Image (cartoon, helix red, strand yellow):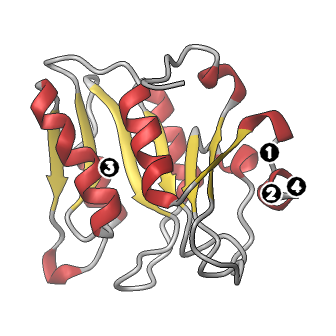
Amino acid sequence: KIATLIGARSGEIAFTKNTSEALNIIAQCVPMAPGDNLVVHAREHPNNLHTWLHLRSKGVDVRVVESPGGDVRQEDIASAIDSSTRIVAVSAVSYCTGRRLDLKTLADLCHARGALLVVDGVQAVGTVRLNVADLGIDAMACGPQKGLLCTHGIGFLYCREDLARDLIPVYA
């Protein structure tokens, strides 16, 4: 049912305990090395921001993007992406402003530069139409306590099938 809801295949869904665990799984599984960078906005939910900041301990250049006026602007995120960017982490809907980024355009830019688009979907799934395949999202973390009107303690990670085949889990 989750796969159908977000436009994925059932084999692309893994159950987790919450959004944070799903984000941490993908953060630790994508190969990153010193010299690589990832891009995340300063106004992301702390679960999304701190997950990526932790990768600094592995020598990853975590580019924390600021936007004037405290909003989340797509053009500021896009300007931080370069050929060494491996991941761009964004929310489908900002928890602090409600802004919705153009995920398709952002995914296309990421893919053109060899980066993955990882989305925090907790503010969006169940409230806005979101098709991960059509949008080009590579991975998405979500808990059900918002728009899916479910209890805490369960979540899911969507990971594009061809990407998942190359990931090495940090725990079994």
Q: Is residue 115 left or right of residue 75?
A: right
Q: CA distance from mark 2 to mark 3?
A: 29 Å
Q: CA distance from mark 4 to mark 1?
A: 6 Å
The amino acid pointed to by label 1 is Ala
Label number found at residue 2 = 2
Please tell me how crowded label 3 is: few (under 14), some (14-19), or many (20+) other residues with Cα within 10 Å: some
Locate residue 41, reporting x and y percent: 25, 60
Q: Mark 1 or mark 3, which is nearer the start of the sequence?
A: 1
Q: CA distance from mark 3 to mark 1?
A: 26 Å
- Quadrant location of the C terminus? top right
The amino acid pointed to by label 3 is Ala
Q: Mark 1 or mark 2, which is nearer the start of the sequence?
A: 2
Residue located beneath label 3 in the image:
78
Locate residue 149, reporting x and y percent: 70, 84
> Do the residues under discs 2 and 1 have CB atoms within 8 angstroms?
yes
- Relative vertical location of residue 10 with respect to residue 164 in this rendering, above or below: below
The amino acid pointed to by label 4 is Thr
Task: Classify mark 3: helix, strand or loop.
Answer: helix
Please tell me how crowded label 2 is: few (under 14), some (14-19), or many (20+) other residues with Cα within 10 Å: few
Q: Is residue 5 left or right of residue 46?
A: right
- Quadrant location of the N terminus? bottom right
- Res 166 quadrant in image: top right
- Res 55 quadrant in image: top left
Please tell me how crowded label 4 is: few (under 14), some (14-19), or many (20+) other residues with Cα within 10 Å: few
> Do the residues under discs 4 and 3 have CB atoms within 8 angstroms?
no
Residue located beneath label 4 in the image:
4
Task: Classify mark 2: helix, strand or loop.
Answer: helix
- Relative vertical location of residue 154 with respect to residue 32 in this rendering, above or below: below
> Do the residues under discs 2 and 3 have CB atoms within 8 angstroms?
no
Label number found at residue 8 = 1
